[in-house]
Image (cartoon, rainbow, N blue to C red):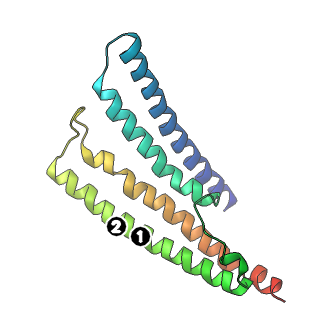
Amino acid sequence: MDKVKKHWTLLEDVLTGIFFISGLGLIFYGVVLRYVFKNPRPWIEEISMYAIIWGIMFGLSIALRNNQHITIDLLYEKLPPKFQRIIDLFANSIGVIFCVCLVYFSTDLVISTYKTGMVSMTVGIPMWIVYLILPISGTFFLIRFIERFINTMRKADKYDSSSV
């Protein structure tokens, strides 16, 4: 199981890095073309925007994995460990439900967009390809929420022993 987890983590990191670096590289290329060679290319803005968005969407699961999402824990830290565990289970359950809905409805969006044949304005990329990041990143996010939920369930001893 650790090997699968390690490969999954590597996949998240590599995909996020590839899309961010590609997007930033394209932006740099666009700036050089525009200001140095006075020859702007409109397709660069569109492709770099999609690459950055895809990088951000893949990065959501990395932030959850590393516990770097915004939290308000002023009250949480004051609660007894048993209540903290209940809140953690509740929050992760809500996260799982959100991700299931995200994957379901975004898959419907991708299918609908595919059927209509809608394409982007500048480059003509089929928009279903652009929207495909929603169910993909939702699945990545869902896996991390399930992992957190299971870890919270397994750490029941931590919550129970610290309250004694």
Image height of 103 relative to 41, above or below: below
Q: Residues within 10 Å of mark 2 (few under 14, many from 20)?
A: some
| Viewer-closest of 84 and 19 | 84
Type of amino acid under label 2 = Tyr
Residue extending farthest bottom: 164
Residue drawn 48% across the image and 27% down it = 25
Reply above or below: 53 against 24. below
Residue annotated with mark 2:
104
Tell whether label 1 touches label 2 (CB within 8 Å): yes
Choose top left, top right, bottom left or bottom right for residue 30. top left
What secondary structure is found at the residue carrying circle 1? helix
For label 1, the residue is: 100
| SS under mark 2 | helix
Q: Nearer the viewer, residue 59 or 4?
A: 59
Percent coordinates x, y for residue 21 in the rendering: 51, 33
Camera-side residue of 139 and 86: 86
Residue that extends furthest to the left in the rendered view of this protein: 116
Q: Label 1 sits on what residue type? A: Val
Q: Residue 104: x percent and y percent?
A: 34, 67
Q: Position of residue 121 (x, y in %)?
A: 21, 37
Within 10 Å of disc 1 (Cα), the crowding (few <14, some 14-19, many 20+) is some
- Report which quarter residue 42 is drawn in: top left
Which residue is at the far top?
37
Q: Could you say which quadrant of the image residue 99 lies in?
A: bottom left
Residue visible at 64% across and 61% down in the picture: 67
Image quadrant occupied by the C terminus: bottom right
Left or right: residue 28 versus residue 62 is left
**From what the image shows, is residue 115 above or below residue 97?**
above
Give the residue displayed 71% in from the left and 86% down from the top.
82
**Is residue 107 placed above or below 161 in the rendered structure?**
above
Q: Marks 2 and 1, how far apart in space? A: 6 Å
Q: Residue at coordinates 37% horizontally, 40% vertically from top-left?
A: 50
